[in-house]
């Protein structure tokens, strides 16, 4: 696993919770007993965006680019039973390790692919389309150039269903250089783009995560209200002219 040691340990603060650490750094949190309860704030925000992508409880098709401990795949199965999901992970050993120690909820339909996120898009069945495509592999300014670009987003967008949403987690440093570049790249491809994060993140003074969502139609104003209300708080959504401050 890129030469780094992976460990899964019980979480002392949640019953049924487990933490995946790689190289001594916490990477994912999973609650096996309540998979609909997401511990990490940025993943909770992604979950709330998934909630809006289709009527509540309705099965969807989902593509996860960057599998981690499959926290979001578990969430989708718990909230939308019967969903068809695909997960792409670069490290086969990591995925096998996770699935061995943290089994998926009964009934989960998850298809796994091992390889590069961009290359794996071309390996999927040609007619397969997704209601959500979730990219969660950026962990700082040194993002893979072949993925942090409009050309990759164009290829990912081609995999969306008519209602599909492209969701990108951008972990960034103060100044938000990567966030700004990805807003610009997404805006060249999608009909509309919005950013969702803890309100203080948009000041550019702190490291952290900002969730970007690309839609194929104008950003629905009710989504802004829904995401802001659902938190985690304090939550803020930038769309339209408000997002110009983050456009690369």
Image (spheres, grey):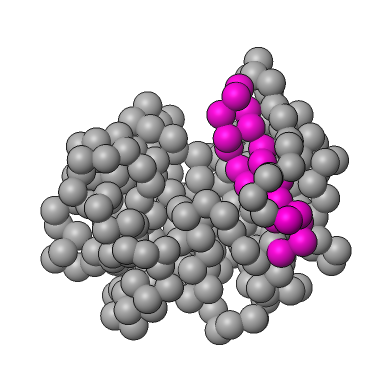
Indicate left or right for 16 with 214 as reference.
right
The C terminus: image quadrant: top left
Residue 191 vertical placement versus 134 (above, below): below
Residue 58 vertical placement versus 129 (above, below): below
Q: Is residue 84 magenta?
A: no
Residue 126 appears in view: no
Residue name at image x 57 percent, y 46 percent: 65
Residue name at image x 73 percent, y 36 percent: 8
Pinpoint residue 76: horizontal percent, then vertical percent.
Answer: 65, 66
Pinpoint residue 229: horizontal percent, then vertical percent.
Answer: 37, 76
Pinpoint residue 191: horizontal percent, then vertical percent.
Answer: 30, 66
Residue name at image x 53 percent, y 73 percent: 51
Q: Which residues are magenta?
A: 15-34
Q: Quadrant of residue 7?
A: top right
Indicate left or right for 8 with 183 as reference.
right
Q: Nearer the viewer, residue 173 or 214?
A: 173
Residue 167 vertical placement versus 223 (above, below): above
Query: Count the marks: how many?
Result: 0
Indicate left or right for 50 with 174 as reference.
right
Residue 197 appears in view: yes
Pinpoint residue 223: horizontal percent, then vertical percent.
Answer: 36, 77
Residue at the extreme top of the image, as rendered: 3
Residue 176 vertical placement versus 40 (above, below): above
The N terminus: image quadrant: top right
Main SS class of the magenta portion in the image: strand
Indicate left or right for 233 with 23 as reference.
left
Q: Nearer the viewer, residue 3 or 31?
A: 31
Q: Is residue 22 magenta?
A: yes
Q: Nearer the viewer, residue 165 or 12?
A: 12
Residue name at image x 68 percent, y 45 percent: 12
């Amino acid at each position: 696993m890129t030469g780094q040691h992976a460990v899964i340990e019980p979480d002392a603060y949640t019953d049924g919770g487990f933490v995946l650490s790689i190289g001594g750094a916490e990477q994912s949190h999973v609650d096996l007993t309540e998979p609909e309860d997401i511990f990490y704030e940025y993943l909770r925000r992604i979950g709330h965006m998934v909630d809006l992508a289709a009527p509540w409880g309705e099965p969807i098709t989902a593509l996860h680019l960057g599998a981690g401990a499959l926290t979001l795949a578990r969430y989708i199965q718990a909230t939308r039973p019967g969903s068809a999901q695909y997960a792409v992970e670069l490290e086969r050993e990591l995925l096998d390790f996770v699935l061995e120690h943290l089994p998926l909820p009964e009934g989960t339909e998850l298809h796994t692919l091992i390889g590069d996120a961009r290359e794996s898009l071309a390996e999927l069945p040609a007619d397969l389309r997704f209601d959500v495509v979730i990219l969660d592999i950026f962990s700082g300014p040194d993002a893979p150039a072949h993925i942090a670009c409009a050309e990759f987003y164009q290829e990912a967008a081609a995999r969306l269903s008519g209602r599909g949403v492209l969701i990108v987690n951008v972990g960034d440093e103060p100044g938000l250089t990567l966030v700004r570049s990805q807003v610009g790249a997404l805006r060249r491809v999608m009909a509309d783009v919005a950013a969702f994060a803890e309100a203080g993140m948009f000041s550019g003074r702190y490291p952290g995560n900002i969730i970007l969502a690309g839609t194929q139609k104008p950003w629905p104003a009710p989504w802004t209200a829904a995401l802001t209300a659902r938190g985690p708080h304090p939550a803020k959504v930038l769309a339209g002219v408000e997002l110009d401050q983050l456009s690369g």
